Amino acid sequence: MREFNVTGLCIPGKHYMVDISEKVRQTATMVEKGQYFTINRARQYGKTTTIRQLEKVLLEREKEIFGLLVCVRFNIILQGLPADWV
């Protein structure tokens, strides 16, 4: 049974959420072309969920993700960056 999630990552089959798959596909195409993008919204707008879905799409397309930076509540998570970049 799905429920509303008001904290953290939303999971499509578990939580009610807006379908952003087309926006994520467009953003993935931008990444593949080497273009830049920003996600700048207030809290509880789905920034973390969007980044996680983008990561999933890029991995499905077999694209390497060189770095993923997610800032959540002043915590910085670095994944996949070379050690000399951190």
Image (spheres, helix red, strand yellow):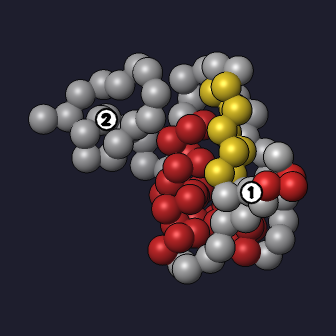
Residue pictured at 84% horizontal, 65% vertical: 35
Q: Does residue 17 appear in the picture of this structure?
A: yes
Dot 2, crowdedness within 10 Å: few (<14), some or many (≥20)? some
Q: CA distance from mark 1 to mark 2?
A: 32 Å
Quarter of the picture holding the N terminus:
top left
- Residue occupying the point 60% across, 37% down: 47
Q: Which mark is residue 16?
A: 2
Q: Earlier in the sequence, mark 1 or mark 2?
A: 2
Horizontal and vertical percent position of residue 3 = 23, 28
Query: The disc labelled 1 sits on which kind of residue?
Result: Leu
| Quarter residue 18 falls in | top left
Which residue lies most toward the front here? 83
In the displayed structure, does residue 63 sit left or right of residue 10? right
Circle 1 packing at 10 Å, graded few (<14), some (14-19), many (20+), is: few
Where 65 falls versus 61 (above or below)? above
Q: How many marks?
A: 2
Tell me where residue 36 sits by quadrant.
bottom right
**Residue at image x 30%, y 35%?**
15
The extreme bottom residue here reads 62
Q: Image check: 59 left or right of 7?
A: right
Amino acid type, mark 2:
Tyr
Horizontal placement of 31 versus 57: left or right? right
Percent position of residue 17, x then y: 38, 38
Q: Nearer the viewer, mark 1 or mark 2?
A: 1
Tag of residue 81: 1
Residue 67 image offset from top left, x and y in percent: 73, 57
Camera-side residue of 71 and 21: 71
The circle on residue 35 is none
Look at 52% across and 50% down and name the residue there.
52
Q: Residue furthest left?
A: 1
Secondary structure beneath disc 2?
A: loop
Q: Is residue 22 visible?
A: no
